[in-house]
Image (cartoon, helix red, strand yellow):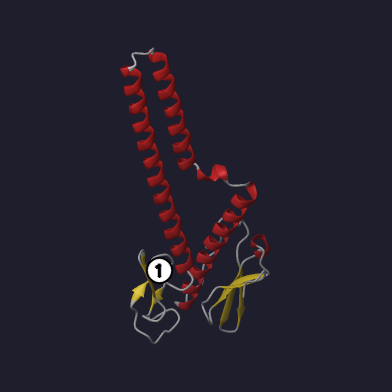
Amino acid sequence: MGCVNHPNAPVAATCKSCRASLCGICTKFLDSGEDCDMCAPLAEANALRKSRIRNEESRTVEMAQTTTTRITEEEDRQKARNKDGLYIKGGVGLALLMLFVSIGLYAYPDLRKSDVQLAQEQAVIQLEECRQVFQAIGIRLSEGEIPDSTMSCPGTNIPNIILRQGSKITVSHPNPRQFGLVELYVTSDSHRVVMEGQGQG
């Protein structure tokens, strides 16, 4: 089988996300591997997210090292002045508290996000997961197979709608409005996922 978009073109790569066969023109070569046009934006977004997490981790480590240095200096000053050890213990306790708070904010970044932001991010993730399911259905259609009812979007209990018009087969999502869309479907003619509504086209 040739490229999913250009059947006569030789296959140069396979999309690491949806496993679609791609020619050189359709392949997006990213640092994380080869992706198709549809999967590349999510792969780039994931790479950006991982980069941000690494940067946040570096800042947390640097903060911990700075805190440790300050604790050591404070202990040395207190020992030199031969003062009561209670002050040192209090400073160490405060520094450890700051360190635990910093690690907590790093480990649970969603605590700083509003419910609206979390809901929007979850909606984007669910739509992308559903798009990947329909892309897999498109690949099955391109291979002349009829997808079974188990190939449905996560969180959708109603089976997809399969419509046959002569040799053309259309598989539609039963409730695209849960994603804010008017239509979400793929056909045996183009094998491309169509998402219409709210700026989609």
Q: Amino acid at mark 1?
A: Arg
Determine whether, in the image, residue 113 is placed left or right of residue 71.
right
Residue at 41%, 55% (x, y): give it: 51
Residue 54 drawn above or below residue 46: above
Residue at 58%, 47% (x, y): give it: 113
Q: Is 181 or 75 nearer to us in this picture?
A: 75
Determine whether, in the image, residue 64 is placed left or right of residue 141.
left
Picture quarter with the N terminus: bottom left
Rendering coords of residue 24 (x, y %): 36, 80
Residue 124 drawn above or below residue 170: above
Residue at 37%, 85% (x, y): give it: 9
Quadrant of the image occupied by residue 157:
bottom right
The total of numbered circles placed on residues is 1
Q: Is 53 or 32 nearer to us in this picture?
A: 53
* Label 1 packing within 10 angstroms: few (<14), some (14-19), many (20+): some
Instruction: Note whether residue 160 is visible.
Output: yes
Most distant residue in the bottom direction: 8
Picture quarter with the C terminus: bottom right
Q: Is 81 or 3 nearer to us in this picture?
A: 81
Most distant residue in the front direction: 81
Residue at 49%, 71% (x, y): give it: 38
Residue 80 drawn above or below residue 142: above
Rendering coords of residue 116 (x, y %): 64, 51
Instruction: Note whether residue 155 is visible.
Output: no
User: Which residue has dot 1 on it?
Assistant: 19
Q: Secondary structure at mark 1?
A: loop
Rendering coords of residue 29 (x, y %): 37, 72
Rendering coords of residue 67 (x, y %): 39, 33
